[in-house]
Image (cartoon, rainbow, N blue to C red):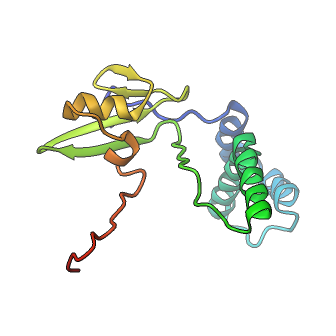
């Protein structure tokens, strides 16, 4: 990563818990394991236990309920009940802060960093949408998510076209 890239910052509670794992006595590691997994430790390999605990702590933190996703699912369920047909999913893409999108366009590599506030950083400037960045790069209007490969393109064959 270069100097302008930003990395995702974990919530302090998770980061501090993970950072403290190497300093915890083994008895506390085992107690934390029992509290989180509900079982005794499967072995006494400290490195194994620390890695699994760190992973589980992150899963617990980042699997919290997303209200937008719940609302979207409720709308889809309601539509299914009313019509008996399931519409295709709404175009919904969420990128984790710190993600780096890379696109090579006309032999030039372009990097976009997803920021924590939902904005995007490209060549030292902040943009509200990927489409604005795609337009900056190409000089024409593009779907930003499609340009950066987040959404699949529609590859419908034309009538009479050979496959």
- Camera-side residue of 26 and 155: 155
- Camera-side residue of 38 and 112: 112
**Quadrant in the picture for residue 53:** bottom right
Q: Can residue 60 be seen by looking at this rendering? A: no
At horizontal 88% and vertical 55% (from top left) the residue drawn is: 35
**Residue 4: x, y in percent?**
34, 26
Instruction: In the displayed orientation, state which residue is furthest to the front.
Output: 159
**Residue 125: x, y in percent?**
34, 19
Q: Can residue 107 be seen by looking at this rendering? A: yes
Residue 103 lies, with reference to residue 117, above or below; the image says below
- Camera-side residue of 121 and 74: 74
Q: Quadrant of the C terminus?
A: bottom left
Residue 34 lies, with reference to residue 58, above or below; the image says below
Q: Is residue 55 left or right of residue 6?
A: right
Q: Quadrant of the N terminus?
A: top left
At horizontal 86% and vertical 68% (from top left) the residue drawn is: 39
Q: Looking at the image, how many numbered discs can be counted on the residues?
A: 0
**Residue 20: x, y in percent?**
69, 40
**Quadrant in the picture for residue 64:** top right
Instruction: In the displayed orientation, state which residue is furthest to the bottom.
Output: 163
- Camera-side residue of 6 and 124: 124
**Quadrant in the picture for residue 105:** top left
Residue 136 lies, with reference to residue 86, above or below; the image says above
Instruction: In the displayed orientation, state which residue is furthest to the left.
Output: 107
**Residue 95: x, y in percent?**
51, 43
């Amino acid at each position: 990563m270069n100097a302008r890239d930003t990395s995702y910052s974990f919530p302090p509670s998770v980061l501090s818990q993970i950072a403290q794992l190497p300093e915890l006595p083994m008895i506390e590691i085992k107690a934390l394991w029992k509290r989180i997994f509900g079982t005794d430790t499967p072995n006494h390999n400290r490195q194994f236990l620390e890695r699994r605990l760190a992973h589980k702590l992150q899963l617990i933190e980042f699997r919290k309920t997303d209200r937008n996703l719940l609302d979207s699912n409720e709308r889809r369920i309601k539509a299914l009940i009313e019509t008996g047909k399931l519409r295709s999913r709404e175009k919904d893409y969420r990128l984790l802060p710190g993600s780096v999108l890379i696109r090579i366009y006309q032999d030039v590599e372009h990097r976009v960093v997803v920021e924590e506030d939902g904005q995007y950083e490209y060549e030292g400037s902040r943009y509200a949408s990927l489409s604005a960045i795609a337009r900056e790069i190409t000089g024409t209007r593009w779907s930003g998510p499609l340009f950066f490969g987040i959404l699949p393109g529609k590859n419908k064959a034309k009538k009479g076209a050979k496959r």
